[in-house]
Amino acid sequence: MPNITEITVRYAETDCMGVVHHAVYPVWYEIARTDYIKAVGMSYAEMERGGVMLPVTGITCNYRRPAHYDDVLEITVRVTRLGVARVEFAYTVTRKGETEILATGTSSHGFVDAKTFAPLNFKKAMPEIYAVLEQKAREDS
């Protein structure tokens, strides 16, 4: 099942028209992704302390409708691809209580060793967390 993160648009995230600046959406995606990882059973900080990092290898953002200052938004995130060395997340932004999509996006990541930044097999590095992530990814489909 996808994870939902609630965000209230802050004044600093908008332009002089009160519309959210395009560069803010990837920051919200990161917040939602971090919440998703916590829902799997481990904080991102714990993952890093365990020797695994998850750098971004690609990101997309498609803007459909503007979000405005003080809107309460829901960022829905789900896993769309999961391999032993890579993962892709998909994001949907809506106003809370509404169904109209304001933006969609994706982020791709590689699992790497925190010390060497060499790619690693996440399934072998953290098998318990990988199993939960794999199950959650199946539920997200």
Image: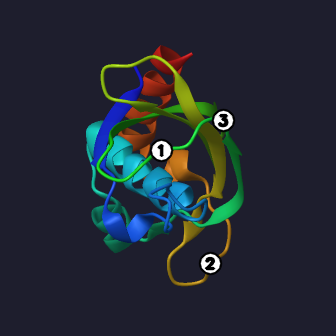
Q: Secondary structure at mark 2?
A: loop
Q: How is the image coloured?
A: rainbow
The quadrant the N terminus occupies is top left
The amino acid sitting under disc 2 is Phe
Mark pair 2, 3: CA separation: 36 Å
- Check contact, mark 3 vs mark 1: CB within 8 A: no
Badge 1: residue crowd in 10 Å (few <14, some 14–19, many ≥20)? many
Numbered mark located on residue 67 in the image: 1
Spot occupied by residue 12 in the image (x, y as percentages of width and height): 37, 71
Residue plotted at (39% across, 19% down): 98
Q: Secondary structure at mark 3?
A: loop
Query: Along the line of sight, which residue is nearer the eye, 75 or 10?
Result: 10
* Mark in front: 2 vs 3: 3
Residue plotted at (61% across, 59% down): 22
Q: Earlier in the sequence, mark 2 or mark 1?
A: 1
Mark pair 3, 1: CA separation: 10 Å
Spot occupied by residue 34 in the image (x, y as percentages of width and height): 37, 53
* Residue that mark 3 sits on: 64
Residue plotted at (44% across, 58% down): 18
Mark pair 2, 1: CA separation: 36 Å
- Can residue 50 be spotted in the picture? no
* Mark in front: 2 vs 1: 1
Badge 2: residue crowd in 10 Å (few <14, some 14–19, many ≥20)? some
Spot occupied by residue 81 in the image (x, y as percentages of width and height): 66, 33
- The answer to whether 95 is drawn above or below residue 123 in the figure is above
Numbered mark located on residue 17 in the image: none
* Residue that mark 2 sits on: 117
- The answer to whether 116 is drawn above or below residue 35 in the figure is below
The amino acid sitting under disc 1 is Ala
Spot occupied by residue 106 in the image (x, y as percentages of width and height): 65, 43
